[in-house]
Image: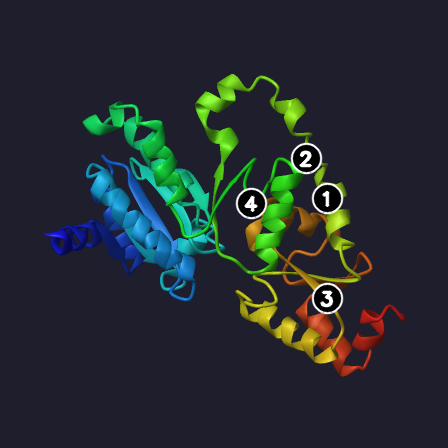
Amino acid sequence: MAAGAAEAALVAVEEVGSVGQFEELLSLKAKSLLVVHFWAPWAPQCAQMNEVMAELAKEHPQVSFAKLEAEGVPEVSEKYEISSAPTFLFFKNSQKIDRLDGAHAPELTKKVQRHASSGSFPPSANEHLKEDLNLRLKKLTHAAPCMLFMKGTPQEPRCGFSKQMVEILHKHNIQFSSFDIFSDEEELEASEELDKICPKAPKLEERLKVLTNKASVMLFMKGNKQEAKCGFSKQILEILNSTGVEYETFDILEDEEVRQGLKAYSNWPTYPQLYVKGELVGGLDIVKELKENGELLPILRGEN
């Protein structure tokens, strides 16, 4: 019986393999909430989130769930500006109403619950019942193999301790999900001194200046040293590794504010971007040219 239930949950998560199939699904599910998981077979966190989707499908039979391989149907991914996996889009009446980037199981669960109960279609009776606190906490702490309860999100920590914890997990390349303790409505109502607890985030330009100077050689790329997430980033990593020069990386897919802001800050529209002592060197083509001319190593060492 357990196996049958698992099979039913998997069937409840439809697989979309073409533009036509996606548009047909939007039309067929127009009267219900539709959640689409843009996933990638090379990302282990996507497999984990597929399991979360299967569980949500069992808990919310009135909600439609689907998964779409982001690189397999590029027309849809480009239309909705999907730049990383996993990403979840929420649709009602064939229109996108919300988005979630990253493997954040508790946040996905909250968004599904909120949108499912706010539509024109009737929510299930269970959603009207206030969940026992102990049960809520148990679900949250078991939502992922590694769970971080923090102030803010990994993309925008809202206190120094949370920021340090995220940096440590990223440094060791640990996959984790997070829960923003400030996102709980009851806690928000009880916390009237929120601004005093967490100082305001620095201005974007100041933040970018700090980031570009974080190390003598800084590479802003898709992915990190251990796992490049695009061909251009992979190529520039290979070039830098061949020089033997120490460098640090920043994954722009983890922070949309930095990703968009750095383009204007540096007046350079594409990634990867290489900085030496806070100054932009350029992208992949320039780095290749510098290497061929024998100029790259002196620049990385700060000699030029």
Which residue position holds label 3? Answer: 247
Question: Element type at marker 2?
Answer: loop
Q: Nearer the viewer, mark 1 or mark 4?
A: 4
Coloured how?
A: rainbow
Q: Are marks 1 and 2 in contact (CB under 8 Å)?
A: yes
Describe residue 254's horizontal placement relative to residue 74 as left or right: right
Q: Is residue 289 above or below residue 13?
A: below
Q: For the residues marked 1 and 2, what is the alpha-carbon distance in whole angstroms?
A: 9 Å
Which residue is found at the position 86% from the left and 68% from the top? 302
Which residue position holds label 1? Answer: 207
Numbered label attached to residue 154: 4
Depth check, front residue: 274 or 52: 52
Image location of residue 245, percent across then percent down: 76, 73
Q: Nearer the viewer, mark 3 or mark 1?
A: 3
Q: For the residues marked 2 and 3, what is the alpha-carbon distance in whole angstroms?
A: 26 Å
Depth check, front residue: 269 or 115: 115
